Amino acid sequence: MRKTVPAVLIWALCFILPAVAASPVVAAAAGTGLPTWAAHLTLSTSATADPGSRPLTSNRSDLKLWFEYESAWQLSRALVPVGVRLAVGRGAPALSLGDPAGNLFLTSSAPPYPFAYYRLTMPLSLARTAAGSSLTPTATYTRLWGDLTQAPDERRWLGVHYLQVRLLPHLTLGAGEAVLFDTRFTGDIAYTVVPLLPYYLAKKIPGLPSNHDNSLFFLDASGRFTGSNTTFYASFLVNEFPMHPGAGNPALYAWQAKLQQQLSSGVGRPDREEAGRLFTAEYTQVRHLAYSNGNRALVYGYQGLPLGYPRGSDLDRFELGLTLDEGFLGDTIRIEQLQLFVQRQGEGKLDDWPQNWDEWRQRPFLTGTVETWAGTGLRLGGELTSRRQPASEDRWPQVSPGNGPARMVSSEWHMTVSAGPAWNLEHRQGEQGFRIEATVSWSWSL
């Protein structure tokens, strides 16, 4: 089986570094006790049906398996403790402050691929760290490598890095960069592992033509309005800075905005951040060429599906949701969310690229015959067994003796069903129909 040098290197790091961190010298200096290991397995299947048109228009099943290591390193009591997480396996990691399965940047809804990443988390205030405050400003940095090769003679690898900074108790900012390469080049190992090194600098390397890489840039923010129970989320993704003055390029971008109002707080559920009833309004717009590139090997997707927003491009979608989080039989069955939505989607494909830019600039947003789908959605879920779990992903491990293992749900399931009428069904002018979309997943963690 062919392996690239970066692949071998980063896979080795995922096992060598944990061994070093768990050594008596580092562990004693850090005072963290034993490190935490975890294994995750996810099975999911999804299908879309248009009864009366075609019985089943699409279906897909995925198997994801990955391993994680987590610890806190502190070689000296005078130094800032750094939380470290390493992961390796076959899956679809999510990176953003938004919905892991529905953000614009990197989602868990993508088809699984071999990956490895490291994540570093550290406090930004030593004074508040000493007090052990849960409101300590923190910075979390993730760098990921993924192998998107699908054929023996193909070479596609994904590099992503993402920095999120919690500046205030109710304000977190994020910035990320993703790139696809279809060739090896001088210094590619450094771009796999060196923290904070921008992938965009690879364009300045002699001997690497610009048609061998495709970069995307991402910004997002989440927070709570002062003195209220209203939270917000906003994100923006752009394909290689195409919008500077005078560029004359089409809109190669996507954006998302969400407002959420807490209607009631959860009772007796301090371990669940989403406990309670929440009303959500969300709008997403993904322009036709947001993930595309003139070189099809560099399209931001895998197996014909996007690595970012799971519904593709050339679309917009408005959603209203009511999060209930009502449990039955303990937490075995939960009604998580009720939803109303309207989605418009043009005929554009993920890998489209114009041959005539002058003609393309005249095209309106949502190309060709626009399909409109409106309906309702229901999301169910449940936990079969559980252990102690952290409050959020942006935590950093406190360095203290007796620091226990991270709490993780051992087994959980989720099901989402969306249904409603569709106009111009499958982009056939004047045709109406009824569409049903369903996704079921089961996850197990050890």
Image (cartoon, rainbow, N blue to C red):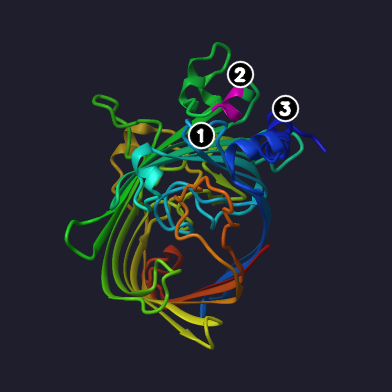
- Depth check: give the residue in front, 74 or 245: 74
Q: Which residues are magenta?
A: 190-194
* Main SS of residues in magenta: helix
Residue receiving disc 3: 5
Residue 154 seen in the figure: no
Q: Is residue 406 left or right of residue 64?
A: left
Q: How many angstroms separate mark 1 from mark 3 (CA)?
A: 37 Å
- 422 vs 91: above or below: below
Helix, strand or loop for disc 1: loop
* Spot occupied by residue 434 in the image (x, y as percentages of width and height): 44, 79
Disc 2 marks a residue whose amino acid type is: Gly
Helix, strand or loop at disc 3?
A: helix
User: Which residue corresponds to mark 1?
Assistant: 77
* Element assignment for label 2: loop
* Label 1 CA crowd tier, 10 Å (few <14, some 14–19, many 20+): few
Front position in the image: 156 or 360 = 156
Residue visible at 43% across and 49% down in the picture = 96
Quadrant position of residue 59: bottom right
Give the residue type at disc 3: Val
- Mark nearest the camera among 1 and 3 is 1
Q: Which mark is residue 236?
A: none
Q: Nearer the viewer, residue 278 or 347?
A: 278
User: What crowding class fits label 3: few (fewer than 14 Cα within 10 Å), some (14-19), or many (20 or more)?
Assistant: few
Of badges 1 and 2, the one in the foreground is: 1
Which quadrant: the N terminus? top right
How far separated are the C-alphas under marks 1 and 2?
35 Å
Of mark 1 and mark 3, the one earlier in the sequence is 3
Extreme residue in the left direction = 227
Which residue is denoted by mark 2 in the rendering? 187
